[in-house]
Amino acid sequence: MKSWKIHIEGQVQGVGFRPFVYRLAQAEDLLGHVSNGVDGVRITLNANEGQLESFLTKIKNEAPRAALIIRVTYHETEWQAFKKFSIVESEGQGKTDLLLTPDLGICPDCKADLETEGGRRAGYAFTTCTNCGPRYSIINSLPYDRHRTEMADFAMCPACTDEYHSPDNRRFFSQTNSCPKCAVQLRIDGDNQPFGQPEILKAVTTYWRQGKIVALKGIGGFLLTCDASNVEAVETLRLRKHRPDKPLAVMFGSTGEVAKHFELRKEESEALESLNAPIVLLSDKVNANKLPLAREAIAPGLDRVGIMLPCAPLFDLLLKAFGSPIIATSGNLSGEPIVYQDREAGDRLGSVADLIITNNREVLVPQDDSVVAFSRHQHPVFLRRSRGYAPTYVHTNTDLPETDILATGADLKSVFALQHGSNTYLSQYLGDLGSYSSQQNYQRTLSHLQQLLQAVPSLVLADLHPDYAASQLAEAYATANNLPLVRIQHHEAHFAAVLLENNLLKVRNTPVLGIIWDGTGYGSDGQIWGGESFVFEAGTFTRVGQLTYYPHFAGDKLAKEPRLAALAIAGDLPVARTAVEEKFTPSEYRIYQQLRTSTKRGCSSMGRLFDAVASLLGYCDQQSYEGMAASRLEAIARKGLADAQLLGGYAVRLDHSGNFAAETIIKAILEDENSAEIKAARFHLTLVSLVEQSALKWGTKEIAFSGGVFQNILLVELLTEKLNKSYQVHFQKFVSPNDECVALGQLAHYTIKQRVENHKKEQHVFSYTG
């Protein structure tokens, strides 16, 4: 018999890991103790080699559902005599090095507790256990213990205290434990009169039935809700929120209800029911026009709807009482961050909601709901990575440096990355940094995560664009802390991110073709990029092709008005003149043509090409949200795909330099006499052909894709089906291909550049020494 010290690293706090270890040790008749530390879970126990091996095997194979074990190490230590196995006080000293557990959706056991007639938690809106509930959004400091969270001020009643100390109870050491006797209290904002939970729940459902809008405080902030079948209520919400077209998420009570209305595959159902509890994009069933939903008001012009299940007990109770799906969208005005503090709810949401429901448990970190879609090949595509996933990014074999580095990311779909020790942290989705409040939210979130981890960056990474708010924040941070600042080109960061996610970030001689298509990014030549081809080989990034430059004018209006993209690309095409000109008044056309012909700035944006095609096919001339035109184009292309595949893509070829011209594609579309649906589908097929031509030209067998264009599920499916037989195709896996991945890519890009430099130095030393 020997004494052993065991160190378990990963996502092992806030998931019931200590109770799990306690029960396992009891079952194995082992003596010792377990505790949380700032670097994971620490175990000291007495065992012989056989007992230790059995114990460690069961830890790896039987860990709690939400746990992610990255590494288990152990060593023999000086003999200690133990009389029992116990959970001891957490150790708060040392360097923080652990994965932070995200907020977890309600688990099946807690759902059952809600419905158990006569049970202690029957109908209690804040029911949680060691397997579910808020985590990241309420943590003040580490290690994860109740007194370091926003539950610190909630004293447990005797019954909850007994559960907390009972090894056989799933609330054993549950830091969020409470019940109606020691409850988190619901409140009606602005009303000093005390109301009980039943009265408040009834008020909410009554408001919904009256077609009114209710703001509800969830795990990561407020959601704006209304009856999803009431067209007038949905349109009122859109009007008040200043969100005329962007799709709204719908919350159903169960996957059974969802399956009645939408196509629901196994991977989609599993995602909906997972502890991550994201919004999942689902396709309409054939009888979609018969749904008891305000369908066109929910997702205008689109053939998919964002669907979610209740992620918290409060919503589960409300959906059961209401008996019908609801709209559940972020509690904010368009362009602003989500509201999460009670004190600002009335001021910021009072003009939108008819009723605001808060509670007395504070939210420290605001988070929007995550959004994911799946291709026919079960490939997940994140459109937004936030609640349920952030802030931890789990990876293996990426060889990122074990030092503190801040990567500030991009301005649109903003996310920052923090490399700390052996772990990588990606912030939740922080929106677009165009407003002062969004920039403040970015800085607050960064400060909170740094404080949690006690991270002190020694280097700052930023985008090449000098006018990005994220780049300016990076410059200010680097200057204030006297740190080096490294700027990284936007599309190379995209490419590096997808290489990292697929374990391709190595100094090797096998080339990988990178197809990086998005809206805009600042090019190293000062032009606006967005339709780029790169080859990664021997640790270097080489731009080998592009969508040929077309005029970039009118600033941000070019991205907001697809008709301007049509003018920019097709302005010199005789076949397009009438179709383009009729989209403007005579004075507008004259002014924009002058701007177009006088500009010296070029643009290679694939995103703007999608906009131009959507405009010329008559589906979107002005967009009220980013990606509106492209999303509608994808939806109509899906309708025409079967016929388009018989015809194939248009006969567009790369030139001798590996480039292709947008106007050539536009000309082919306008000369095609088929329906708009078929032309939209043929456009998608043409892009697939151009990718294959690039791979043949540059002799690569591996192709990696990143950029916002690859949120297009139809395009992902076509690329997979067409190329998979001859090539290895790689997409982003656990981050969005849009600009949310840029910060991760900045880390990856810096890593490979440093590796190349170190390799050169080693070669130089070897050469010098003979």
Image (tube, rainbow, N blue to C red):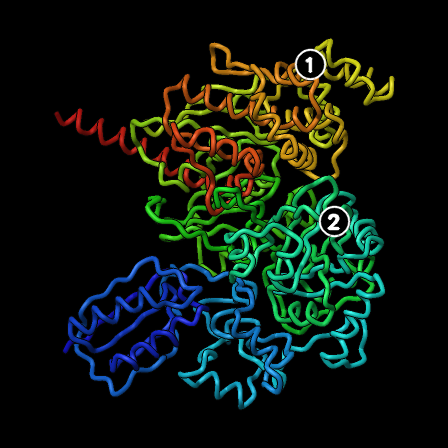
Task: Look at the image and tell me in which quarter the C terminus lies.
Answer: top left
- Quadrant of residue 605 in the image? top right
Please determine whether, in this image, residue 750 is positioned above or below residue 676.
Answer: below
Give the image location of residue 222, x and y in percent.
69, 61
**673 shown above or below 359:** above
Residue 443 visible here: no
Residue at 65 percent across and 57 percent down: it is 260
Q: What label does residue 671 carry, if any?
A: 1
Q: Kindly check if marks 2 and 1 are in contact, taking CB atoms under 8 A apart as contact.
A: no
Name which quarter of the figure residue 665 lies in: top right
Image quarter hosting the N terminus: bottom left
Closer to us: 642 or 697: 642
Q: Amino acid at mark 1?
A: Glu
Kind of residue at disc 2: Ile
**Could you say which quadrant of the image residue 61 lies in?**
bottom left
Q: Nearer the viewer, residue 492 or 630?
A: 630
Give the total of numbered labels.
2
Q: Is label 2 or label 1 in front?
A: 1
Q: Which residue sits furthest right? A: 586
Mark 2 or mark 1: whose residue is earlier in sequence: 2
Q: Left or right? Give the position of 740 relative to 609.
A: left
Residue behind mark 2: 298
Q: Position of residue 572 (x, y in %)?
A: 71, 10
Residue in the image at 67% along x and 59% along y = 251
Q: Is residue 261 or residue 362 the one in the foreground?
A: 261
* Residue at image point 66% right, 61% down: 252
Mark 2 neighbour density, 10 Å: few (under 14) some (14–19) many (20 or more): many
Task: Give the structural element (helix, strand or loop) at label 1.
Answer: helix
On screen, residue 736 versus residue 72, left or right, reads: right
